[in-house]
Image (spheres, helix red, strand yellow):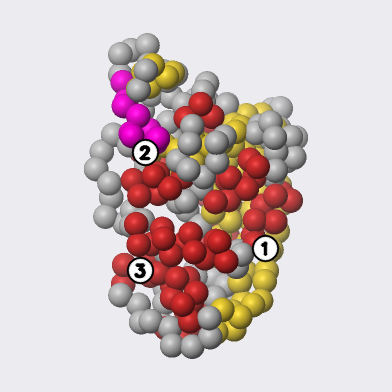
Amino acid sequence: MSLDAARELLACPHCGEPLAPADRAWACTSGHSFDVARQGYLNLSGGPEPANADTPTMLEARARVQASGLFGFLSRALDDVVPAGAQTLLEVGAGTGHYLAGLVESRPAARGVALDVSRAAAKRAAHAHDRVASVIADVWRGIPVRDNSLDVVLCVFAPRNLAEFARVLRPGGRVVVAAPATSHLRSLREKYGLLGVDPDKQERLLAAASGHLVHLAGVMAKSTTTAAADLVDDLIGMGPNAFHAPPRAAATERLELAVRLEVFGPLRQGGA
């Protein structure tokens, strides 16, 4: 549980000046100061938590799903597309910090920042890895990170501020966006009336990114498995369906999981 991983990466959300640790706070040269929470995270949100922030119950469900290994195929796919030599990583909408912690663990020289708007998520991510710093911030209000400072920006099932991703990315860096394919958990969505997946999601992402980043590759990661009813309940309850009072699963389900990874690089000169 250490914010040291964020040294020389964070920027003041008010003025954009570099933030540095000072006792139990982080401060910029303009005098703005932000206290470190006793749970080990730093709150740079500058406003109240939004209504759609992940709740403790949702995060507990997500932690159980991740611990089950159900999304191990996704962790492996992320490890394959993230450069082995990456040293500074940021995950937006990081939740528990599970995917970021895995990438940092397999790269001994790497450190990361887990960014989320949820306080409950920040508390969990603060314990994800000793080389992962946990920070509260709203990606739509701007990412409190210095320009050109990151080797990798990771976005797994999370909001995408592509202009900000491009700003914080180093020349030669990578942005990795993971989003559900149309077949992802289709049987659950049909059986339980869950939120759908936009079939035009990939096309809209590529179009939105075109003014900020260059598309380098697309990778499909898939897995088919069987999940008991309690794990199915957690799958449903860990995401936005939790806000819509979904029905509880009654039986073991055969599942198809399919996630599309889009890899981008910077537009500016110096990208690989």
For label 2, the residue is 39
Residue toward you, 252 or 239: 252
- Point out residue 191 in the picture as x, y percentages from the top left corner: 46, 86
> Are discs 2 and 1 less than 8 Å apart at CB?
no
Residue toward you, 210 or 59: 59
Residue 73 circle label: 1
Amino acid type, mark 3: Ala
Label 2, label 3: how far apart the Cα atoms are: 25 Å
Amino acid type, mark 1: Phe
* Residue 59 among magenta residues: no
Amino acid type, mark 2: Gln
Can the viewer see residue 259 in this picture? no
Classify 10 Å Cα crowding around label 3: few (below 14), some (14-19), many (20 and above): some
**Which secondary structure, mark 2?**
loop
Can the viewer see residue 194 in this picture? yes
Classify 10 Å Cα crowding around label 2: few (below 14), some (14-19), many (20 and above): some
For label 3, the residue is 242
* Residue 42 among magenta residues: yes
Which of the 4 image quadrants contains residue 200? bottom right
Which numbered disc flags the more N-terminal residue, 3 or 1?
A: 1
Point 66% across, 76% down: residue: 224
Label 3, label 1: how far apart the Cα atoms are: 24 Å
Quarter the C terminus occupies? top right
What range of the chain is rendered magenta? 33-44
